[in-house]
Amino acid sequence: MQDWLGIVQAARIGGWVVYPLTVLAVIALVIIVDRAWVFGRFASIPGDVGAGPDHAAALLRLPPQHALRRLLEPLIGHATKPAWWIEARAGALAFEVQRDMSRGLWVLETIVTAAPLLGLLGTIVGMMHAFRLIGNNGLVNPGGVTGGVAQALIATAIGLVIALVSLFAFNYFSRRLDRLVDELEALAGAWLSDLRLAQQHATTTPTPTP
């Protein structure tokens, strides 16, 4: 209980800069929780799911919003189309999946830069408040000066904490996204290779004469 009271007291000392920093912290927390749920639910590829026809049933067991199902299910449904059309469609689907999975990460990246700057602004405001209390004849209000310095330090500390948490989360989700894109490209490439081989075999196999 004393720890929570200490945090509230520190926020009060931090001044008005704490309020926009709190907004940034809430936004970052919402994005982190949302992306963690999305990547955990729709980006984990089971080991029994592949691109071959024998894995079609396992593919359908995935949620409709799953990244792998969103990529391969439309392609499998148009397996009779020419290879160039399927490749173009695969590229468009992969772009849509990557865009949806990375939703909100640019905001997280912005918070990484904005939070320390707001903390620095709080530092400047706090130091200006402390220096105003120093008159030409010496120190006027020692308590006010220390309060201004405390405001500067607290604003900086809060901004750095928000930036660090957001930075670690952004790097983690970016890495997860890169790994997901690599896995999707590998599975789609394997399926396209099998499709080209089947189409080539169908065109080269002579039709039996009656």
Image: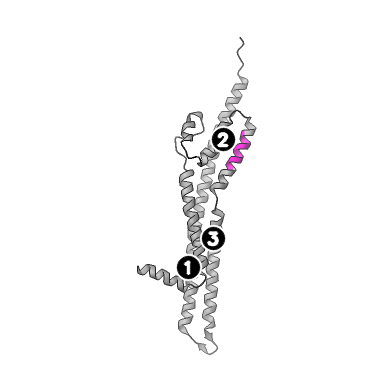
Q: Which SS does the magenta portion mostly show? A: helix
Looking at the picture, how far across and down is residue 156, in whole percent? 50, 69
As drawn, the residue found furthest toward the bottom would be 137
Looking at the picture, how far across and down is residue 12, in whole percent? 46, 72
Residue type at mark 2?
Answer: Pro
Between disc 2 and disc 3, whose residue precedes?
2
Asked if residue 170 is positioned above or below residue 206 in the image, the reply reads below
Asked if residue 40 is positioned above or below residue 122 in the image, the reply reads above
Which residue is at a point 54% across and 53% down the rendered structure image?
A: 105
Given residues 86 and 178, the one toward you in this image is: 86
* SS at mark 1 in the image: helix
Residue type at mark 1?
Answer: Ala
Residue ID for mark 1: 157
Residue ID for mark 2: 74
Residue ID for mark 3: 111
Q: Is residue 25 visible?
A: yes
Residue type at mark 3?
Answer: Ile
Q: Residues within 10 Å of mark 3 (few under 14, many from 20)?
A: many
Which residue is at a point 48% across and 81% down the rendered structure image?
A: 145
Given residues 50 and 16, the one toward you in this image is: 16
Is residue 89 found left or right of 14 in the rendered image?
Answer: right
Whether residue 90 is in magenta: the answer is yes
In the image, which disc is placed on residue 54? none
Asked if residue 152 is positioned above or below residue 58 in the image, the reply reads below
* SS at mark 2 in the image: helix
Whether residue 139 is in magenta: the answer is no
Between disc 3 and disc 1, whose residue precedes?
3
As drawn, the residue found furthest toward the left would be 1
Q: Residues within 10 Å of mark 1 (few under 14, many from 20)?
A: some
